[in-house]
Amino acid sequence: MPLSLAPAPGKPRVSAGRRRRQLRPGRMAKGEDTCIFRGSAGSWQVYSLCSESTLLSEGDTFASVAENECNAVSQTRNSTSQRAQPAALMPKGRQKVPHLDAPLGLPICLWLELAGLFLLFPWVMGLAGAGGPNAQGPGGLSWAVHLHSPEGDREEEHLEQQADAVAQAAGLMNAGRIGELRGHYLFVQPAGLRQAMEVQVVRQQVEAVLAGHKAVHWHSEQRLLKRAKRSVHFNDPKYPQQWHLNNRRSPGRDINVTGVWERNVTGRGVTVVVVDDGVQHTIQDIAPNYSPEGSYDLNSNDPDPMPHPDVENGNHHGTRCAGEIAAVPNNSFCAVGVAYGSRIAGIRVLDGPLTDSMEAVAFNKHYQINDIYSCSWGPDDDGKTVDGPHQLGKAALQHGVMAGRQGFGSIFVVASGNGGQHNDNCNYDGYANSIYTVTIGAVDEEGRMPFYAEECASMLAVTFSGGDKMLRSIVTTDWDLQKGTGCTEGHTGTSAAAPLAAGMIALMLQVRPCLTWRDVQHIIVFTATQYEDRHADWLTNEAGFSHSHQHGFGLLNAWRLVNAAKIWTSVPYLASYISPVLKENKAILQSPHSLEVLWNVSRMDLEMSGLKTLEHVAVTVSIAHPRRGSLELKLFCPSGMVSLIGAPRSMDSDPNGFEDWTFSTVRCWGERAKGTYRLVIRDVGDEPLHLGILQQWQLTLYGSMWSPVDIRERQRLLESAMSGRYLHDSFTLPCPPGLEIPEEDGYTITPNTLKTLVLVGCFTIFWTIYYMLEVYLSHRNVTSTQGCRNGLCHWPQRSRKSKEEGTELESVPLCNSKDLNETEAENGSPPTTTDLLAPDVLNEGDWALSQNNQSALDCPYQHRPPDLLQKEEEQIC
């Protein structure tokens, strides 16, 4: 370490550029290439140091320091494999020099020594720097060599000597042991020989020596390996602002997806369809990932789901959701999607009148192509609506999870709702209440429940979205129609949370395509993370799962979801139990009193279905009450876990109560199904109205034959996979084949086709009427012409050939002038059937007899020649 000491008082300073001085007795001198100290016993210690010297007396201030300096420099020499060489003792009669004091600062020899070290540094690094496996210079050759380990006490020393000998025999330098691998050494080519010899010649010589040496067990030339840092970089200008993907301001408050991307999990091979007001698939962030085969427009009844501009400039909702899921990266435009390798489709259904049948069609549209249905919509979030899918919509949801995605089941992701400011609750939303959907809520950037978010017992999990005006919202793709710019920083609400969840599920399906719809729900329950929120009522159930009405089972974490999906094996089949309809007709008392009804589920009740542990628990009630929003319904599972399935709503004053409305909860997930279930109903209203009546209720349990031990074992297995050790292509669990289910999508008549058919039909009807009029008028003209007057009607003779072939034309009788009334008057009786029969009905004999019986009827043509008669008949006919 440099020293700077002031000289002793009264001692002049020694100039820095002085030459060598003579050493006087009792003094210490630094001579050329030597440092000489006089020891206490009069002996001299000489060390080779530098070529410039100074002379110090024993009384100098630096005298006590000089020895330390020389020792330090000597040790530096030793560290560079240059041992201190003893020099001859200085003769006693050496010329003396006048006394000069030490300089201010370091002695000159130390300065020159340091300068020499800097000059020798490149050469030293070429030699001594090869003393480690990582010191190979650029362009140099190196070999890893495994030597046979000799037996004995000094094994390591023998190996070092053997390594030096083998390296020297190969013309290489032993760079030392490779890490902690015993017997493994790195041999490198000396730096001086790298340009003197051709690389190929050196390689051949070394390979020959190492291959033939008896001490070499294994050797391998070291090649440069190409490795990339596990990180992702995007040139999309808005990606740094997508805090929900990678939060640099508050690390950890994001969906933790970048590690998944680094392992090339991007949703490849999965199709997500956005059921909404349309998707602008021509925008450059969506076009490369657009799936036309999975899209449709139910509002216009055509295959193109392009949104239509509206007065409110509001039909950008579906495009924003699609951008969250699958926006293309590295196109220097806007942002990046969660599953940017997935395909994105659109079903336009919200931009016009919506019916139950249209919903049913939307839920099953192209359900062998589309894997995930993202639905960021629902009934009105006004705090007073109770609505959901009707009969056809419910049937379509059930059919989708049974037959969609080749039998593995379509995944329906729904938003919990934005009615928080109206004190709304998503248990009054039939889509969020359904067991066939994944209900997703929202938290803001700080992990708190936003003002607009709803809470309910059926919520499965939450993910990030916008909060109040002081917090950041979701950055995503936008439409560029009307006032749109193609990119937005203001997407918010649970409408923004549900697509993020859909994108994360797409990542799961890439690594495990055979996940069923129930597998996805189970993985979310097992991997969602609980976090601190003083407003959340976290409770841990009997199976060890924590749930809150505000955040479900917790925050979705892409890393945990994908790692769990990678090793997931399917849950057993869905088992269920339905109680009988329990007729109660009991009054609901006002708070603090309550009505409590019980139902016990015994082991015998569950034996047939095999149900052991719970997933969803549903209660269907019929309640008459003058103000529906004053009711509070709680369900207690056998373990004591409580679920607020029906929260009071101040704005709901509907006097009709509930009619067969189904509430559901997931808070008892994994608990035992056997036991007593309690339904507790209170009237929390303060109006002196009539009491409500619980007319009837019914309990439905959904679960599997998993035991609590199986659930705990699965929890341990998933936690062991969270390190990512299974998240690579070489590890794959077998997937069962899917079912071959036809889409059964018949041809749909478009409006243009319908118009064409109507025009063709009108044209056909017009020509049909015209032809019938023509025939009718022609027939009247023929019958009105009198073929014969006052004579017998003659029928044209038909040839036997035409009669046999059936090609003759219908015959028209040539009637006489007498009508049937006159004939009846003359004969005194009505005409017989035989008299009126046409010749084609009578045989030849009957026809002759008929002519003989009517001989009284005269005809002017009777006595004419046959040829003239035939001619006249032909004219008449």
Image: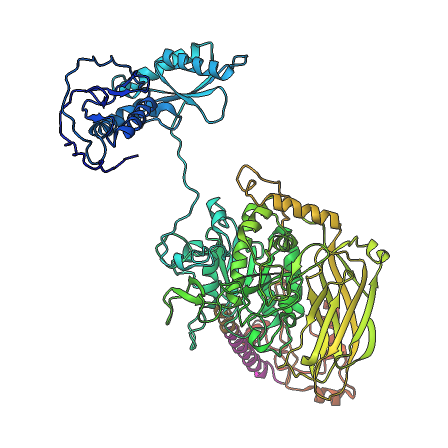
- In percent of width and height, residue 234 lies at 38, 51
Q: Is residue 487 found left or right of 114 in the rendered image?
A: right
Asked which quadrant contains residue 75, the reply is top left
- In percent of width and height, residue 816 lies at 64, 83
Q: Is residue 663 found left or right of 723 in the rendered image?
A: right
Residue at 23 percent of width and 30 percent of height: 60
Question: Magenta stretch?
Answer: 762-789
Asked which quadrant contains residue 29, the reply is top left
In the displayed orientation, state which residue is furthest to the right.
Answer: 604
Compared with residue 70, is residue 812 higher up or lower down, i.e. above or below?
Answer: below
- Given residues 820 and 259, the one toward you in this image is 259
- In percent of width and height, residue 652 lies at 64, 81
- Given residues 851 and 842, the one toward you in this image is 842
Compared with residue 36, is residue 60 higher up or lower down, i.e. above or below?
Answer: below
Q: How many marks overall?
A: 0
Quadrant into which the C terminus falls: bottom right
Question: Is residue 800 in view from this perspective?
Answer: no
